[in-house]
Each structure stands twice: as C-alpha cells, then as structure tokens.
Amino acid sequence: MSMISLEQANARLARNQSVLAQTETVKIGQCLGRILAADIVSAINVPPADNSAMDGYALLSEDWQGPDHGLEISQRITAGNPPLPLKKGTAARIFTGAEVPPGADSVVMQEKCRTDGSSVWMSEIREPGGNIRPKGQDICKGATVLRAGHRLRPQDLGLIASLGIAEVDVRARLKVAIVSTGEELVEPGHELKPGQIYNSNRYMLQSLLESWGFAVVDHGITADDPDIISDVMAAASRNADVIMTTGGVSVGEEDHVKAVVESLGFIDLWRVAIKPGKPFAFGEVLGTPFLGLPGNPVSALVTALVIARPFLFACQGAGQQEVVPLKQVALFDKKSSFRQEYLRVRMGSDGAEMFDSQSSGVLYSTSWGDALAVQKPNVDIQHGDIVDVIPFVLFS
Amino acid sequence: MSMISLEQANARLARNQSVLAQTETVKIGQCLGRILAADIVSAINVPPADNSAMDGYALLSEDWQGPDHGLEISQRITAGNPPLPLKKGTAARIFTGAEVPPGADSVVMQEKCRTDGSSVWMSEIREPGGNIRPKGQDICKGATVLRAGHRLRPQDLGLIASLGIAEVDVRARLKVAIVSTGEELVEPGHELKPGQIYNSNRYMLQSLLESWGFAVVDHGITADDPDIISDVMAAASRNADVIMTTGGVSVGEEDHVKAVVESLGFIDLWRVAIKPGKPFAFGEVLGTPFLGLPGNPVSALVTALVIARPFLFACQGAGQQEVVPLKQVALFDKKSSFRQEYLRVRMGSDGAEMFDSQSSGVLYSTSWGDALAVQKPNVDIQHGDIVDVIPFVLFS
C-alpha cells in the first residue's frame, strides 16, 4: 500500500467510471440541478416575430415627414394580440412586447410623441429597426441551446420554457448508498455511553450528496460484524448505483469491511497523499462501485469533495464539474509536509485567515471556515503569499 | 421617477425589511440550507474523552525502558467499548477512535511495535500525549458553535450531529408568491398563437427561489384586467410573506398592476441605474411586501440576483449573504453607459469572455455564460483590463 497522488487516485477512478443513471422525462418545474440526457434544440424562433421594445408608436420610417407632420393612428396593438398590416401612411399605437405590424419598420418611444387621440406627432424617429426586437434575436429555430450532460440552473429552465418545452429528458438521480461503520457511533438524540461518539458523517454526507442532486439510500450504522456487514453491502448493491462507506477501511484487525468487500468483489486500499484524507478505498460489491471514505469527519468531507465528487458526477452522466481555485493572500504561516494539504480558512477582504487547529479531528474548523486553501507538497506558506483557495460554495 | 443607484435601491429595501419567517423545529436530516433561529451551544465535549488517533498500543510513557524491554498486554480496547484503568507497567492493545485507558498517556502506532501475542516491544515511543486526540479537542462543553441567522451547510449539519443534537430551531421557509403578468404569455407545452410568447420567468424564478430555500406560492399568469389582478394580489398577500411579480409594472396605459397595488397599499416605481434591469417596483399589498421585477427575463434574473436576493434573505432571517466578486481579465472591449452593467460572460483560464449580444432580450446569454461581469458606470472596459466578475454559483 504505497502512497499515490490525488491525480493518480482520480485517474484510477476515472478508468472505472461509467454513466449509471437511466433517463427519465421530467416536467421543467422539477428539473433544477438535474442533468440533461439529450441536447435541447429549439423548434421555434425566439421571439417568434418582431416585437416592440418600448411603449410608443410603430410606423414605416419613410412615412415620417418631420415633427410637424402628424400621422393618423390606424390601430392599437397590445402584447399578446396579433396586429393587422399597417395601413400605408399611418402609425400604430404599440406597447412593449407587442408584435410589430407588417408594413412598419420602426418604433418611436412615447416620450418622443405628442397625440390628440386620433393622430400622432413624433419629434424624431430612429433608423429602420429602431426599438424593435427582431424575430429570432434570442434563439433561431433549429439551434442547439444546451447539451446533454449539462446541469440545469434556473436560467436554463427559463430558457427551455421560452422554447415552449414543458418537460425534458434528464438522468434519473444517481442512487448512492451510505453505510456508516464503527461500533463507537451513536445517533444524535440518544445518550452517549463511555467510549462512544455521535455519528456526524451520516448527516454531513447525506446532505452533501443531496445538494449534488443524488438520491441517498441510507443504510444507517453497521455493527463491526462480518456477517452483518456482508448483508448490508449486498443490500446496498441492490438498492443503489454506488456504495459509499465511512470508516472501517484500514488494515486494522477490527476493520471487517475490507474482507467483506473482497469476498463480494474487489477492494483497493489507497493511501492518497492528501491531508486530511489519506486512507481511501475503491472497489466493487457485486458489480456496484464502492467508495470507502475515512471515518474521521474532516477527512470524510475532504475526500468526498476532491475524490468522490468527480466520480459521482461522472456516474450521474454530468459533464465535467470543474472546480477552479481562487487566488488569495495567505494571512498565515504554515509549514508544508510531503502531502497536499487542504487547510480550513475563512476569506475576508484582506485575504484568507487559517483556523488555529488544522487537526483532522476538528470538524469545527470546516464550519468556522468558508473555504479550503490548497497547500502544495513541500511548499511552505508564508504570510502574504498568494495561495489557491476553494470556497466551499464552488463544490456545489 | 428619477433614476437611483443600486446602492440606493438596496438601502431603501433594507429600511423596509424585517424577519417575516416563524420558527419551527426540524430534524437535522431535513435542515440543509435552512436558517438557524437560535445559537447552537454544545452540551458536551467533543470528543467526550481522550481517544487514540492510531491502531497501536497505549502505555504510560515512563514505563517504556527501551526497544528490548517488553510490556505485558493487559487489555484490548476497541472503539465504542469503555476501557479499564491501565494496570501499572503494562500496555493496552488499542484501535483508532477507542478511548485511551486511565493511567496511559501515549499511544505507539503498531508499525513501531513487535508482539508475541502476550507482550509488546516498541522500537520508539512519542512524548506524553502522542497519538492521542484529547477530550474537547474539537469542541468544549458550553461553546457556541453556530449563530442564529447561519445558513446550514453539510459540514454544519455534521457538526450539530457530533454534539448529539437531533433537531434544531430554524426559520420556516419564507413563502414567496410569484405572479406573472402579461396577456402575451403562454405556458410551455401549449401552442403559440400570433403575438404570444412563452412564459419563461415563472420557471426561472421558481427554481431560483427554491434554490435559496424559499417556499414558492405560484399564482400563474394573470390577465391584464384590474379586477382579476386585484383578486390575485389579495390572495397572494394572504398566502405568502412576500409577493413577487414579473412584468406589468410601468407607466404604460396597459399596465394595471401599479393602480391595483396602489389601491391595496402603496407602490414606488424605481428606475435603478443598472442594465439590464432598470424598472423595479417596491411596495406593499395589504401589509405584504411587494417586489415588481421587469418582465424581460434577463432583466428579471439580474434584478432577482442583485436587488431581490438580499431583501428576501433578510425577511427569511438569514445573516448577510454577501457576494464578493472575483477579479478576472476581460477578454473583450465594451463601451460603458451611465448605468452599471451586468455583462454575461464565461470564465476560462485566460479570463472572462463576453457573449456577443448583450441585449436584454437574449436570455440565451445567461445560459451560455457562467458569470456576470460588473461594468461600472462611465468606465469603458478594454481587452486585458481587470474587472469584477460574479460567477452565478456565488449567488446560491
């Protein structure tokens, strides 16, 4: 079990990833954060016809003879109602969003107009096309506006709606089973006996996975018993697309997960050169991919963000969900190690401040902070250095 | 109706904001993105007792007499099971996370140990406290770990669970009514008649508000009829904490929202010096705050992000949800205007690229892009300039 870099770990996972989620058709109102399973192609022009950008008057610009020459108002066009062709030599009262009548080529804003109710005088007019939003300005019929693999944001749903599309093909939510191992774990709300601690990973990982749009299949806390672990793993492989465990994967004689996973498939124990987060297991349980996160909550969080996340999104069928660090001034000194470190920091207007204790036992550091600073192996950080910082929100 | 700056608009809204959401008690598994209604104070130490950071052997360090001196193994301590006091002059087999026995002050990792099953020989030991995670290292009893107004992230839920807390007091989801106005609007999935366009704001705003954790009360599309608008507004004021409309708020003779809101409370029409997004209305309908967004989808998106968002989070009871722009290289030239512009851009490793058409009619620009570049009033942008850029994800 030699040590591998984060890049090596991610490359090995990438070799084992495939799209595991089926396709389903979902109403756009329920599609936030979902992954497109097919391209979105527009069947219409948006807008479907030339329309007015203003409240004002539409005319054929060559009919304007100067500010003292009135034009008869021959129709009134409101948004949502089709216009008649414009009678030659007249103007049409028109409102924002209303279709420009055939025969008109310009709209004059009402602030430039004077009217007696039956005719209109315009102090100036714009060139042909003025104040008109042309047909197809936003999207032309036949255009591909979004690609399969895209993760849908609010504006994408607005865009799809603007094409008249009411439901789309998306990937079914990736089902991820969570199994917590460790006889010392107790659920919150219960009394703690000597030697016990509360299970925090379950709630942290469940909400993290849900925030990524996955469906969590919770298998609770599993006793340190090979038969029970085996039953839970087999059930998880039936119920989910990917199995994620926390704790219990080491070479220790009390860790039964390794033997169980080996008996049901395969397991590779990795020592990834990151801190926190060194121990990480990858394998397969009855054909279902298996990710073994460390039991320590800070290590579990960091490995979930930097190792599990890209793999899970790939299994979901999403395009690359790249996280690009920001450059920030370090307001701290930090000695390096031979592992890449993810320091819990808080960003401010002057730079990034580091939490005092970077022990992986201190989950509070991740709540105190709003970002991870990345410390390269063997590169000390000195106050004032520019460092890579990843706000937690970028992992969303 | 003179023009006001974004800061003036936000300051006027801030004077009218108050916490409108009630408090409710919710299980932590359902609390992602919710707003704490009370501080979280720890009733316990985390960890509750000294525990081992390693698989290895626990001893009193003064009992170690060198690598050739064996110590009897007097007990075996696994995680979750309470230890006995350590018998003087002996060692205890111990596993990661297990409680260190009274009488021991150090743990030696198993890689430094040799054993015949009944005794252990250690090649070296660490100073007292070595490889031990001390009681209260993460959190001390009585410490305030999270403050009221905090928006709960996955790691916060893990932290709360680690304190043994199973449910917390959070703010009830702010209820936001959405009313779309405009007779030209048709729902996706239906046929478009001449003069009509599809309703995109409804889906965009609904998902945006939901992504912020609010409860959307959808009032659909309202006909351009004062009596109908009045009924819908009155219903919205009963059903929701805040009313948000799109479209229909201008001085145009076809816009009835203004008169209706005035008859039921008050309305101020603002021209905010931003682009897109100039027209914005604020008021009150039967005591319920009213936000009138422009009907144009790009303008609706931008005003929702930069004007409505801070106000809504304040009404929800959340602490400030500040958005800090990044500095990026502009890969484009752009003339300024007297309004502050929000340009749709896409970030890459070289800088931010601008979408060709910055017309507010082009919703596609917001889907193409992943960020808004902020162009200050009267400041031209030249290729290579450093500009403020706000990735959409920072508005989450």
Image (spheres, coloured by chain):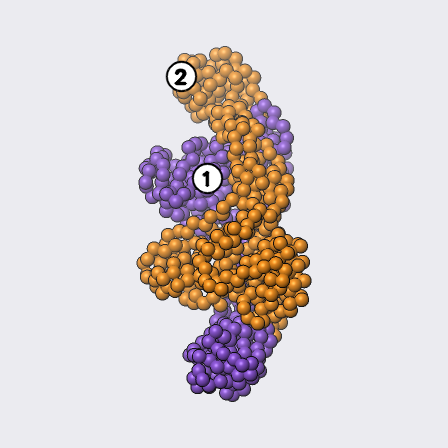
Chain colours: A purple, B orange
Residue drawn 45% across and 50% down? Answer: B323
Q: Using the image, tell me which numbered label, if any, was put on residue B67.
A: 2
Q: Hey, what amino acid is under mark 2?
A: Pro
Check disc 1: other Cα within 10 Å, few if <14, some if 14-19, many if 20+.
Answer: some
Residue drawn 60% across and 65% down? Answer: B259
Q: Give the vertical position of A341 relative to A117 (above or below).
A: above
- Is residue B210 something one can see in this rendering? yes
Check disc 2: other Cα within 10 Å, few if <14, some if 14-19, many if 20+.
Answer: some
Q: Position of residue A344 (x, y in %)?
A: 43, 38
Residue drawn 50% across and 87% down? Answer: A89
Q: Chain of mark 2?
A: B
Residue drawn 41% across and 21% down? Answer: B126
Q: Give the vertical position of B388 relative to A86 (above or below).
A: above
Residue A319 placement, left or right of B170? left
SS of the residue under disc 1: loop
Q: Quadrant of residue A229?
A: top right
Q: Chain of mark 1?
A: A
Residue B307 placement, left or right of A353? right
